[in-house]
Image (cartoon, coloured by chain):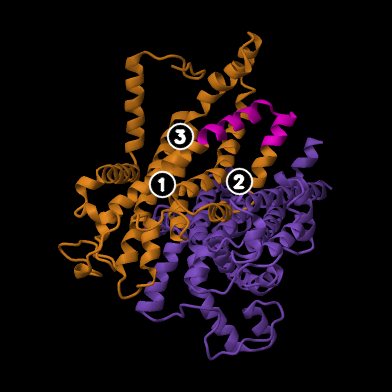
Chain colours: A purple, B orange
Amino acid sequence: MGFITFLVRRILHSIFVLLGLSIVIFIISRIMPGNPARMAVGPRAPQYVIDEMSRLMHLHEPLHVQYYYWLRDALHGDFGTSLVTRRAVADDMKEFFPATLELTLFAGVIMAGGGIFIGILSAQHKDKWIDNVLRLVSYLGVVTPSFIFAIFFLLLFGMALEWMPTMSRLSPGVSPPRTITGLITVDSLLAGNLTAFLDALWHLILPGIALAMGGLAQESRITRSSMSDNLTKDYIASARSLGIPERVIMRRFLLKPSLIPTVSILGLDFAGTMANAFLVEFIFNWPGSSSYGYSAMLRKDLNAIAGVVLTMGVVFIVVNVLVDIVVGLLDPRIRLAPQRGE
Amino acid sequence: MTVQAKNPALPKSKIVENLGRNWYKFSRNPMSIIGLCTVLLVLLLAVFAPLVAPYPQHAGKFVDFANASRPPCKEYLFGTDVIGRDILSRIFFGFRFSLAMGVVVLSLVVPPGVTLGLIAGYNQGTWIETVIMRITDIFVSVPSLILALAITSVLTPNLTNSMIAVSLMWWPWYTRLVYGLGTTLRNEFFVSAAEAIGASKVHIIFREILPNCFSPIFTKMSLDMAWVILIGSTLSFAGLGVQPPRPGLGTMVAGGRIYLPEQWWISVFPALAIVVVVLGFNLLGDGLRDMFAAEEV
């Protein structure tokens, strides 16, 4: 029962946060100097078009009424027309978002898997040379912005060694699979097209790792410290004294409690991944919603900016709810806490 | 002098002794010393950039096509860019923008963030706490970089506006930190004692609770210098921070991007400079954290 209450609270809280976020985004799109209607129709539009647009955008009404109309449209998935592509922002998002989702999910998998693996390796060889090397590398990973990783990877593996492709999602000769989910790797697998799958995966590696580096380093540091903390606890000593093999102790007793901090920071790191995707996609010419959002920002394309930021916010909040559920399953203290309070 | 509850007014000799002990704790870790030296070096290079840069006039608009795109050599240690400006000199001036970003953002963010956190923590269980903390929830619910990018792009993209945008995104973290500390501190005996003798709320919040929050706040500030500089360079790279021809480190990386891989030095050296600055502040912050942590034991 406690877990259900916890979940319901968490979801209600998310809805509240999303509403707040929508207010923030609405304010951002209205603080802009100049007439929003003129921005929406472009600088050369005649006056009657601007008047028509102001009426459509309810600009003559007070701000809270404008917000109501804006939110009503946004809830129906209508963010207006993009100034740049001249199409509905929602259609643009449908086209570009899967590419970003594929990239960030791939980065997320590298981040979680690699970070936990390196963290365990570090903790098992604590204070030996492997640990010292891994810690140094993690430190560099934490302090280097991902756009710099992207540029270094592009330069080294893409240009100097020419091992990896440097742009887009597929090689020119490879025909893309029929769109089902929009994730090329998944679609090509569903279609049984192994060539396209491998090619798409090959294109994902450089931008994916560049995006994952920061989070990966963070995850491995946290896994290492929580594992080595737990290694000194009494229950591990008693398990050892009972003669339980070290491998079983590691897997059965140590890993689960040690992963709690790692998983709980995963949501934040995933947020970092989505934010950094803006520049990494741009550097690798990745046709995703982040590079779409980035070009919208450079051109002050308000509707597109609002659409992209709100979508990112939704994804981020959903991911964080999922993370909380996983943490709740891992950690009975959190899962049962709300019950105790009542 | 503020009177600290855990640490009542000390004679001068004791303060000096404390400083010495803290320095000993800090200096035991060589990484902290490396961090401190890096930060001091960057600080000095930034302040004295016009004196130490080999070509100070290259910081702004300057064109020398005879020496354009030269690879690293004796005259130009880090090479020159496509219009012949010395990369090394521009990096020294670039440090100025990075440090300015960090200092301005933190001084805009820390006072309101800390004050709100104190108020929310002291008024625990009331509507004041709910309002403040739910607002911070909204701001931390979306990656700060995305909102900072959006805000800067909607305003005019330049250094000042990027500072404002990052500040708007950053204060909730201080509110949350101080709120967490405040909720435990407000139940300490010295707070109850102050309430009992009728001290005002302002006195309790700022003279009783705040001084006990200083070490975590300072630690967070030194670590945040690193993150703010990192976000600032990212904004500059995106074309939303320092505008050319001024030499922002991120701006320089972005400017050299299209000349990769042949003229790699135009991007690579400013990129390494960003890593060095961020690394320095990070090591320093970790050192301070260990020092304060040892203090509490």
Circles 2 and 1, Cβ within 8 Å, touching? The answer is no
Mark 2 to mark 1: distance in Å?
34 Å
Residue depicted at x 61% and y 34%: B180
Residues tagged by mark 3 and mark 1 found on one chain of the structure: yes
Residue depicted at x 44% and y 49%: B159
**What crowding class fits label 2: few (fewer than 14 Cα within 10 Å), some (14-19), or many (20 or more)?**
few
Mark 3 to mark 1: distance in Å?
13 Å
Q: Which residue carries the number 1 mark?
A: B282
Task: Report the chain holding disc 2.
Answer: A
- Which of the image's four quarters has the C terminus of chain A? top right
Q: Which residue carries the number 3 mark?
A: B218
**What crowding class fits label 1: few (fewer than 14 Cα within 10 Å), some (14-19), or many (20 or more)?**
many
Report the magenta residues as a range. B110-132
Along the viewing direction, whichever of A287 and A271 lies nearer the viewer: A287
**Identity of the amino acid at label 1?**
Asn
Q: Is residue A308 visible?
A: no
Circles 3 and 2, Cβ within 8 Å, touching? The answer is no
Could you tell me residue B277's position as x and y percent?
A: 36, 50
Along the viewing direction, whichever of A235 and A17 lies nearer the viewer: A17
Task: Report the chain holding disc 1.
Answer: B
Task: Report the chain holding disc 3.
Answer: B
Mark 3 to mark 2: distance in Å?
36 Å
- Left or right of B134? Residue A69 is right
**Identity of the amino acid at label 3?**
Phe
